[in-house]
Amino acid sequence: MPELVVLQHHPATGPSAFAPVLDQRAELPWRLVDVAAGDDLPAPDEVAGLVVLGGPMGVPDRAEYPWMDAELALLTAAVDAEVPVFGVCLGAQLLATALGGAVVRREVPEIGYLPLTRTQAGHTDAVAAGWPDGAAMLFSHEDEVATLPAGAVPLLAGSEGVSAWRCGSAHAVQFHPEVSSAQLAEWSTVLEALLARAGQDADTLLAEAERRERYHRSVGAALLSRWLDVEVLPRRREAG
């Protein structure tokens, strides 16, 4: 039977707090594919769903990362085949690009915890409908989706760009529901330049991450769980 595949783009941006959620699903085996390290990408018909994680690189730097073209082709084919896809930060930007949207580099990075509320479409989307309005999620990005793909609808709002959206079988979030405070601490050197440009410092951000840890993780886990229940598991059962 098809399995869930998690696409990783950098050693420091792995599944983090998502891993325990996935490990608890005995009925849904999953594996990690390190795209940047050259791991083979699966074919769409081999997977029950794809989780596409973040990374310090960006779509505007695509020429520097030859693996991006193959991943973009996979994401296009996956959505064409109605495979459930969940994109996080860079993963959301790759999805938007694969589906015909546009990604641009911001003048000032958006970093910090922002409260998010459901849009009108978010109230009826089966994955976003359970979102607790006002829940603050971690944003950490210098690129963002400037133009959504045709047919995409925003699901959550609260950041300067589109916080979350859906297009066909794909859900995408610009924030990081998977990041624990421990993983964020690992990012400190990568984020140093971005934090300086955003007028922030790592110690303040990490202290806030530790204060918000329990709630942030519970909201992120619930979001992933709804996606698994609504999108991935029904596909896996049909394949069986």
Image (cartoon, rainbow, N blue to C red):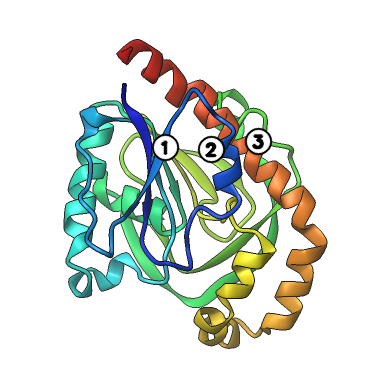
Q: Which mark is residue 59?
A: none
The answer to whether mark 1 and mark 2 are in CB contact below 8 A is yes
Q: Residue at x 42, y 67 (%)?
A: 11
Residue 237 position (above or below residue 46): above
Question: How many angstroms separate mark 1 from mark 3 (CA)?
Answer: 18 Å
Q: Nearer the viewer, residue 175 or 6?
A: 6
Q: Nearer the viewer, residue 13 or 104?
A: 13
Q: Residues within 10 Å of mark 3 (few under 14, many from 20)?
A: some
Q: Residue at x 74, y 37 (%)?
A: 132
Amino acid on which disc 1 is placed: Trp
Please provide percent x and percent y for residue 107: 46, 78
Please provide percent x and percent y for residue 86: 43, 41
Whether residue 128 is visible, yes or no, is: yes
Look at mark 1 in the image and give the residue it sits on.
30
Residue 39 position (above or below residue 109): above
Look at mark 2 in the image and give the residue it sits on.
22
Nearer-N-terminus badge (2/3)? 2
Nearer-N-terminus badge (1/3)? 1
Q: Secondary structure at mark 2?
A: helix
Q: Secondary structure at mark 1?
A: strand
Figure quadrant of residue 8? bottom left
Q: Residue at x 51, y 29 (%)?
A: 228
Residue 91 position (above or below residue 66): above
Look at mark 3 in the image and give the residue it sits on.
222
Question: How many angstroms separate mark 1 from mark 2 (CA)?
Answer: 7 Å
Quarter of the image where the C terminus is located: top left
Q: Residues within 10 Å of mark 2 (few under 14, many from 20)?
A: many
Judge depth for marks 2 and 3 and give the one in front: 2
